[in-house]
Structure formats: C-alpha cells, structure tokens
Image (cartoon, helix red, strand yellow):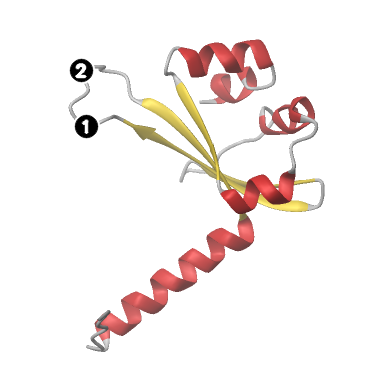
Amino acid sequence: MIKLLKMLASKQQRDLLIEFDVICLSFSRRATEALRLSDETEFFGVVSKLTLSDENAVVFAFNDVDVRLNVFNFTEPGSTNSDPVKFFSFRLLEEWLEQVESEKQMTDWLEDGVIILDI
C-alpha cells in the first residue's frame, strides 16, 4: 500500500494505475468543492507521504481542509479479475463524522425499538 501511495505523486503513474484498473480515485462532492484541486500535484504529493492506520484510513489537512482518506479493495461483482481495485475515497472529515454520528443514532434507535417509517 505504501508503494501505491508513493506512486500517486506522479500524474503519469497515477493515470497508468487508473487506466489499468489498479486504483480508483473518488472524491465526495463536498470534498471536491472544498479542495478545489487547483494544484493537483501538491495535493497528491501530500497524499503520497501519508501512512495509513490499521483501518486503511488516515486524516490529513490540505489547504486548511481536513480530509479523511479511506482505502479499500473493490471487486466488481461477477468480475474474473483476481486482483481487486484499490479504491481511494477522499471525504471531508466533517462529512465522515456526520455519517458516523448518523449511523450511531440509527443503531441507537434500532436498539431502543424505535421504528421509522418512510411513507
């Protein structure tokens, strides 16, 4: 994984990794708006130096924006490709925390027996 992160620093290597379905880069809409990647080289230079936690995630700051990077394996259903694609998901830390809180609240409601109907 460290090798893949380092390879992201080079646009040419990044493009080849994407072209050959080794990686997929995903930015949430809010992350795209907040980061405004005017200097893609600088952004991926920062990303290439990150160290992932045991959860394959890391939080970092870029241009005063806190970003959470999650990396996970993705295999398309029915795919004959034995090697999964490494999926790099960039989200605002704030956005990720909102999702975690929402999931916690839903779990609490379910544990308390609250039934939610969407009619």
Labelled disc at residue 80: 2
User: The disc labelled 1 sits on which kind of residue?
Assistant: Pro
Alpha-carbon distance for marks 1 and 2? 9 Å
| Rendering coords of residue 30 (x, y %) | 62, 53
Label 1, on which residue?
Answer: 77
Q: 30 or 53: which is nearer to us?
A: 30
| Rendering coords of residue 105 (x, y %) | 40, 78
The local secondary structure at tag 1 comes to loop
| Rendering coords of residue 103 (x, y %) | 40, 69
Indicate whether 95 appears above or below 29.
Answer: below
**Image quadrant where one finds the C terminus:** bottom left
- Compared across the picture, whether 111 is left or right of 85 comes to left
Q: 97 or 27: which is nearer to us?
A: 27
Q: Residue at x 69, y 49 (%)?
A: 33
Indicate whether 70 appears above or below 64.
Answer: above
Total numbered labels: 2
Q: Residue at x 63, y 22 (%)?
A: 8
- Compared across the picture, whether 51 is left or right of 73 comes to right
Q: In the orientation shown, which residue stands out farthest toward the left?
A: 78
